[in-house]
């Protein structure tokens, strides 16, 4: 979806039950609008973003006539919210559509501590924001997010360190399984949890907060590494950053859950 | 703080700049001026610029609700986050054709004049 965003009117015209706002974030500032009233709003099953901020027109929310609520994997909003296209937010005089955005912070300009600009590589898995706007009040809402799995085997680089940034917003458990199948070269693998901050990336000491989960250490050929990450033991992070020194093959399976298993 | 050369840099400086405005008791006035200055830059009829105008609408509401002078510290964060996101989406839409280069440049110049803290 990203931009141009999907047209919510078509879902209403075609009598669908819900509007699936679902897209990888195209930027940290993505914001989506709906001119359709809804009977319930929930974080979708594939969402990497855990907390979604929603704004809607409310005559009694003064000044500004804008009411804010947060949707999360554990807290949907069930109840009619009207898009008030005929009314305007103040002072901007913009129509009173329903607005959504990721409340969690994302920063594609983040670079891990120790990143060497000219030799290292970084790849971000853009976080998916998924919000379901139900056009009628549903009889029930299921559990919010699936246990998400990311699978990789080969990595596109030939020098320095390769950093892979995987979204982890609100997750409470993660199972990491990594095996070096390069038959000649060890692969030095590390894991860091990062919480993004609003900061000047590229400065000497950006404000992002990093927690080492696995100290980077060599994994020899045909050796496997398993790492369990628990919120109660390791903390909660916006993203997990995997560092590798070899292009593979090296199967990496990352399975994350909202349940504190 | 030096002027932000790009909208992405402006996003990264948003919290630092607004913290300085906050400390000077200027958070409400400067954010209000910024919104007032730029709201008319993005016509409602141009759908591709709605993400920017929607952020201005949100930021303007947040500014309206701030008390004059020095508000509670907790009020600074949502304003800084909204400005961060506004700058980022403007940068993205500038690159993808959703807004013009001229609009992006005007927004950035306004940011450096009104929000940037010398």
Image (tube, helix red, strand yellow):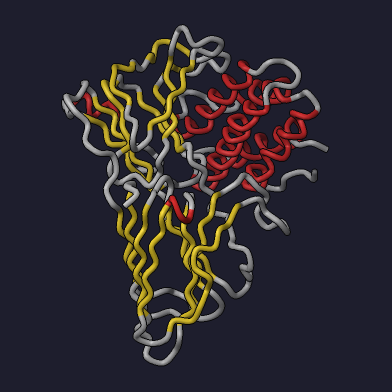
The image quarter containing residue A32 is: top left
- Count of numbered labels shown in the rendering: 0
Looking at this view, name the residue that lies furthest to the right.
B118
- Residue A197 visible in the current orientation: yes
Q: Is residue A83 above or below residue B6?
A: above
Q: Is residue A166 above or below residue A66?
A: below
Q: Residue at the location (53% across, 55% down)?
A: A194
Looking at this view, name the residue that lies furthest to the top.
A60
Give residue B97's position: percent from left, percent from top. Answer: 50, 43
- Residue A249 visible in the current orientation: no
Q: Is residue A112 above or below residue B36?
A: below
Q: Nearer the viewer, residue B47 or B72?
A: B72
Q: Is residue B61 found left or right of B26 in the rendered image?
A: left
The image quarter containing residue B87 is: top right
Q: Residue at the location (48% across, 23% down)?
A: B44
Give residue A7's position: percent from left, percent from top. Answer: 31, 32
Give residue B14's position: percent from left, percent from top. Answer: 67, 39
Q: Nearer the viewer, residue B7 or A165?
A: A165
Q: Residue at the location (52% across, 65% down)?
A: A122
Q: Nearer the viewer, residue A91 or A104?
A: A104
Q: Residue at the location (65% across, 54% down)?
A: A201
Q: Please state, as top left, top right, bottom left or bottom right, where the N terminus of chain A lies in the image.
A: top left
Give residue B62's position: percent from left, percent from top. Answer: 59, 22
Looking at this view, name the residue that lies furthest to the front.
A233
Looking at this view, name the residue that lies furthest to the bottom.
A184
């Amino acid at each position: 979806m990203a931009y141009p965003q999907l047209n919510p009117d078509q879902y209403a015209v075609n009598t669908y039950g819900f509007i699936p706002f679902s897209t990888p974030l195209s930027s940290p500032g993505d914001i989506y609008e709906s001119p359709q009233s809804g009977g319930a709003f929930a974080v979708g099953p594939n969402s990497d973003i855990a907390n979604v901020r929603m704004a809607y027109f409310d005559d009694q929310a003064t000044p500004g006539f804008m009411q804010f609520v947060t949707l999360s994997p554990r807290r949907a909003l069930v109840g009619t919210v009207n898009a008030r296209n005929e009314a305007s937010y103040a002072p901007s005089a913009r129509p009173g559509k329903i607005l959504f955005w990721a409340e969690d912070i994302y920063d594609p300009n983040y670079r891990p501590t120790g990143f060497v600009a000219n030799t290292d590589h970084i790849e971000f898995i853009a976080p998916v924001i998924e919000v379901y706007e139900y056009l009628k009040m549903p009889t029930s809402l299921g559990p919010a997010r699936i246990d998400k799995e990311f699978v990789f085997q080969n990595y596109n680089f030939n020098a320095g360190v390769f950093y892979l940034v995987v979204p982890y917003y609100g997750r409470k458990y993660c199972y990491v399984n990594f095996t070096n199948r390069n038959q000649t070269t060890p692969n030095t693998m590390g894991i860091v949890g990062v919480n993004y901050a609003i900061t000047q990336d590229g400065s000497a000491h950006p404000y992002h907060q990093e927690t080492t989960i696995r100290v980077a250490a060599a994994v020899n050929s045909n050796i496997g590494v398993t790492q369990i990450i628990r919120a109660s033991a390791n903390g909660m992070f916006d993203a997990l950053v995997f560092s590798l020194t070899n292009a593979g093959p090296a199967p990496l399976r990352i399975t994350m859950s909202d349940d504190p298993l | 703080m030096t002027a932000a050369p790009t909208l992405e840099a402006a996003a990264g400086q948003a919290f630092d700049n607004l913290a300085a405005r906050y400390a000077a008791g200027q958070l409400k006035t400067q954010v209000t001026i910024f919104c007032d200055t730029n709201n008319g830059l993005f016509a409602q009829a141009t759908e591709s610029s709605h993400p920017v105008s929607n952020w201005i609408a949100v930021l303007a509401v947040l500014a309206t609700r701030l008390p004059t002078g020095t508000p509670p510290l907790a009020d600074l964060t949502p304003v800084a986050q909204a400005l961060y996101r506004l700058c980022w989406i403007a940068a993205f839409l500038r690159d993808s054709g959703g807004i013009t280069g001229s609009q992006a440049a005007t927004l950035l110049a306004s940011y450096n004049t009104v929000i940037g803290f010398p």
